[in-house]
Amino acid sequence: MKNTWLLIPILIGVLLVLGFTSPQSAVLAQAVTSSPTPTTTVTPANTATSTTTPTPTYIPTPTPTQIPISADTGLPVVINLVESGLPDDGYGPDRYPVYINPLTGLVVSDPQIFERRPVAIKVTNHPRYVRPQSGLSKADLVYEYYMEQGIARFIAVFYGQDAEKVGPVRSGRLFDEHIFRMYSAYFTFGYADTRVKAYFDSLETEIVNSFVLENDLDHARKCGVSAPSRLCRDPELEGYNTMFANTEEIQAYFDRAYGDNDRPDLSGMYFSDHVMPSIDPAAIVKIRFSPSMYNYWEYDPVSDHYLRWQEMEGNADETFERYAPHFDVLTGEQLSAANVVVLYINHKYFAYTEGSEIMGMDFNGRGQAWVFRDGFAYPAEWVRPGDGGVLRLYTPDGEPFPLKPGQTWFEVVSQYTDFQRDGQTWYFHFQTPPVSYGRVYLIDPGVSPLEWFYEFQNPGKIMPWNGVIDTPTPTPQATDTN
């Protein structure tokens, strides 16, 4: 064959390659497959070196979801990073990812729930037989404040999740206006002192239309028996503390009645898992409103939250105080808070007589606060923006204070409140304003009490009157004919 000799060198080369490389290839392959895989040692969080703030180990309900899913399409929610980009650390105070609740800093599974207004509900805490109450653990925020006759009461704000039964619902007070204005909330309450109710009715029409008060149809509804409704009465309870609210049905009511259930701007709070170091441990935070009503919050390192304990009986002697865990009957769990914030607010009496107390609280401008999170105490300043918006908290250096993601309880105390500290226990002894001669009369000659209320509650703004209360007619002046 022509040029057959050229194939001989090629065949010899192939044989040489196979002969010399196959054993080496086998050895190399064996070396690669038998080489130990490099490993990285990760030190568990609980064995890390000591830090000032414990590592968070608990995430409160609702359970955070890493990738929110649309209920309509079943697909992941598209997040516009230009409008809702993540900050370097934490969320807020002015911008939040679309799936972050601006009142808790927690993730929700469906951001569509934010396309509505919050619901604020007044909840009683006395007489003691009303405990355990229902639904407080579902709230985003809870404010506790002194009302009258040694009694404190709650106003809870619901936004990021609903609660089918909240209460017992009781009457409103002047302080509540600060809350339903700050959070643009529908306000659910069980009537009020006649003077306070007259004041509420004199506010702007859109405010009055956002109130939820029981009517005859509501009163006839039986909780757990009738179809779900905005308000119902629990047939298993006795007395007058039997009214409860359903936040989802309240939302549906306003959707049908007014169609003004639009999402408000709720920016202002800042949330982060990280906080500056503190040298002030706070295992227990005690709030004593009066000899008959007091509570404390105890830091639980397992849940990394503060657990609430409530008094079992009145006692002027603190050495004989008796407490019990404060539960939510809706969940069966003890009430807890990621943050407990003590707010110092100026108090004054509008009326103080044998039969009534009407307290004014100047929740405007700025004031002193203490924030308790992760078992430590932090000094802070509260600020209510003059142009509206939710309450903001700042560090002594003027930076937004990083609240722990989760529910926040605000304990409102007066400027006269006594403060003591014993190791890791912090005491706040609420004191009412001094009363000259044992009483304060509401009405002064020529001054409308409603104008007093509005000027104190909303400084610098004009009383709306709302057409409900007529403006007093000026007294005719005598004509000088001389």
Image: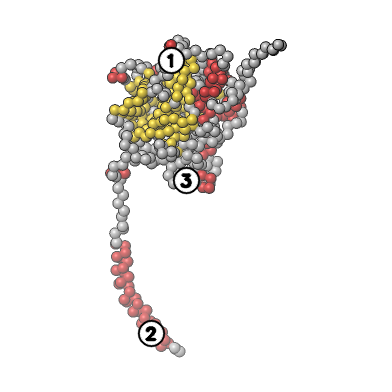
- Image quadrant holding the N terminus, namely bottom left
Q: CA distance from mark 3 to mark 1?
A: 51 Å
Q: CA distance from mark 2 to mark 1?
A: 117 Å
Q: Nearer the viewer, residue 105 or 247?
A: 105
Query: Element at badge 3?
Result: loop
Report if the CB atoms under discs 3 and 2 are less than 8 Å apart: no
Name the residue: 42% across, 28% down: 343
What's the residue type where badge 1 is placed? Answer: Val
Q: Is residue 320 left or right of residue 68?
A: left
> Residue 306: image x %, image y %?
36, 31
Is residue 226 something one can see in this rendering?
no
Neighbor class of circle 3 (other Cα within 10 Å; few <14, some 14-19, many 20+) is some
Neighbor class of circle 1 (other Cα within 10 Å; few <14, some 14-19, many 20+) is few
Name the residue: 39% across, 20% down: 431
Q: Which residue does the numbered mark 3 point to in the structure image?
A: 86
Q: Earlier in the sequence, mark 3 or mark 1?
A: 3
Q: Earlier in the sequence, mark 3 or mark 2?
A: 2
Note whether 307 is above or below 219 in the view shown: below
Name the residue: 54% across, 26% down: 458
Note whether 70 is above or below 471 in the view shown: below
> Residue 307: image x %, image y %?
36, 29
Q: Which residue does the numbered mark 1 point to in the structure image?
A: 435
Report if the CB atoms under discs 3 and 1 are less than 8 Å apart: no
Q: Earlier in the sequence, mark 2 or mark 1?
A: 2
Label 3 vs label 1, nearer the camera:
1
Note whether 170 is above or below 3 in the view shown: above
What's the residue type where badge 2 is placed? Answer: Pro
Q: Which residue does the numbered mark 2 point to in the structure image?
A: 9
Tell which residue pokes out farthest to the front in this image. 482
